Image: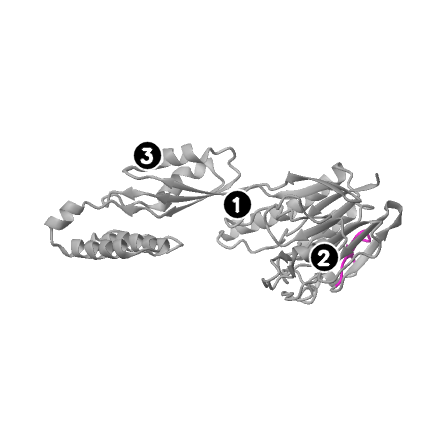
Amino acid sequence: MNSVKILHCADLHLDAPMIGLLEHLSEIRQEELRENFGQIVELAKKEKVELLMISGDLFDRESVKKTTIDYIVRKIDDIKPIPVLVCAGNHDSLSRNYYYKRESWPKNLHLFDRTIGKVDFPQKNLCIYGVSFYESYEDENLLKGFKVDDPSKINIMIMHGEIVSSESKSRYNPITLLDIENSGLDYLALGHVHSFSGLNKVGNVYWCYPGTPEGKGFDETGVKGVVLGSIAKDYVQIQFCPTGKREYIEKEIDISGMCTYEEITEKIKDNLEIKSKENFYKIILKGDISEDFSISSEIIASKLKEVTYYIKVINETTFSIDIDELLDNDTLKNVFINNIISNIKECHEEEEIRLLKRALKIGICALNGERIEFDENF
């Protein structure tokens, strides 16, 4: 059976701004994303793939550093004669970005245009289709009505977009499963979704999002990587290959009843099961604590910095309230607390209850003359 060995990746977002990190950490992280592309190229060489496919958002924005462009050019040139096939996504759309217009891209790179084009590989009985975002938004389905020219070939499409139901809309190339099924493709190599989708099939067509190969924030938790696979006529086999240097991990930890920083940090360490100091951690503290214990997120983070590369602590604890004491004591603080508790009892919305509990805690801190710490979700 004729088959082609591929490496499929997407959404590298090179030179992304790394919002939320200090400037020096942001620059380090940007360099790590560039190095990640180098690792992908080395993996392609090691595995002796026949095609490297990049399904959009190779770059994050219009302003890309020359050093980034030079690095990508050198790495692509290093793997000649392996073809590198690229489509632009919503972040690196053709109309906005000068770097795709440069004339010095290596000859083994093929960038697809705003209309569906194809590259034939007759010796492999293979045809690769692709299409790029021209603007940052593509409201129309770029796959709609498409059918392969020769169903006897191995047919692959490289595309950036969002799979939606037939009734739904999207500003990012809304692709329906029916369009995929009717395309006649063997494999649709997608980009845009930043988590690995696994290998999916509709009708006789396989499709996959590899996800981003390196996380860039706590909205991209978990292991990140690329897809290696073999594609033949009516047959696709793939495997997910982790490539991320650092993982973003978010964890909620209940510290109810605790009254010292030592207790809290030990419980965090026990719950995190830290396997690598290389990761980013976001710890969300939950539970009821005594109002006498005014927790500082900075102190907890400082106690854990030796076991992590980066840690962010969000304090969402609430105060435990002695109802009997409130009933016996008609102070301003108790009147405030009783009013909040009454509102909580009458509330049925989980998010509103959470906000009321946070308001209760902040109000008690203010009435006690203590430091008030706001979390990012309040």
- Magenta stretch: residue 107 in it? yes
**At which x and y percent is residue 337?**
21, 54
What mark, if any, has residue 278 been given in the picture? none
The vertical placement of 173 against 196, above or below, is below
**Label 2 belongs to which residue?**
87
Residue at horizontal 32 percent and vertical 43 percent from the top: 287
Q: Return the residue nearer the eye: 287 or 155.
A: 155
Classify the position of the C terminus by image quarter: bottom left
Secondary structure at numbered mark 3: helix
Distance from the alpha carbon under mark 2 to that under mark 1: 25 Å
Image-quadrant location for residue 333: bottom left
Q: Earlier in the sequence, mark 2 or mark 3?
A: 2
Q: Return the residue nearer the eye: 301 or 58.
A: 58
Residue at horizontal 27 percent and vertical 42 percent from the top: 289
**At which x and y percent is residue 213?**
62, 46
Q: Earlier in the sequence, mark 1 or mark 3?
A: 1
**At which x and y percent is residue 243?**
63, 41
Local crowd size for mark 1, using a 10 Å CA cut-off: few (<14), some (14–19), many (≥20): some
Local crowd size for mark 3, using a 10 Å CA cut-off: few (<14), some (14–19), many (≥20): few
Classify the position of the N terminus by image quarter: top right
Distance from the alpha carbon under mark 1 to that under mark 3: 27 Å
**Label 1 belongs to which residue?**
221
Type of amino acid at the residue the image marks with label 1 = Thr
Task: State left or right for residue 196 relative to residue 101.
Answer: left
Instruction: Report whether residue 372 is seen.
Output: no
Residue at horizontal 68 percent and vertical 56 percent from the top: 178
Type of amino acid at the residue the image marks with label 3 = Glu
Magenta range? 104-113
Mark 2 or mark 3, whichever is nearer to me: 2
Identify the image's colour scheme: rainbow, by chain, secondary structure or one colour. one colour
> Please, what is the dominant secondary structure of the magenta stretch?
loop
**Label 3 belongs to which residue?**
263
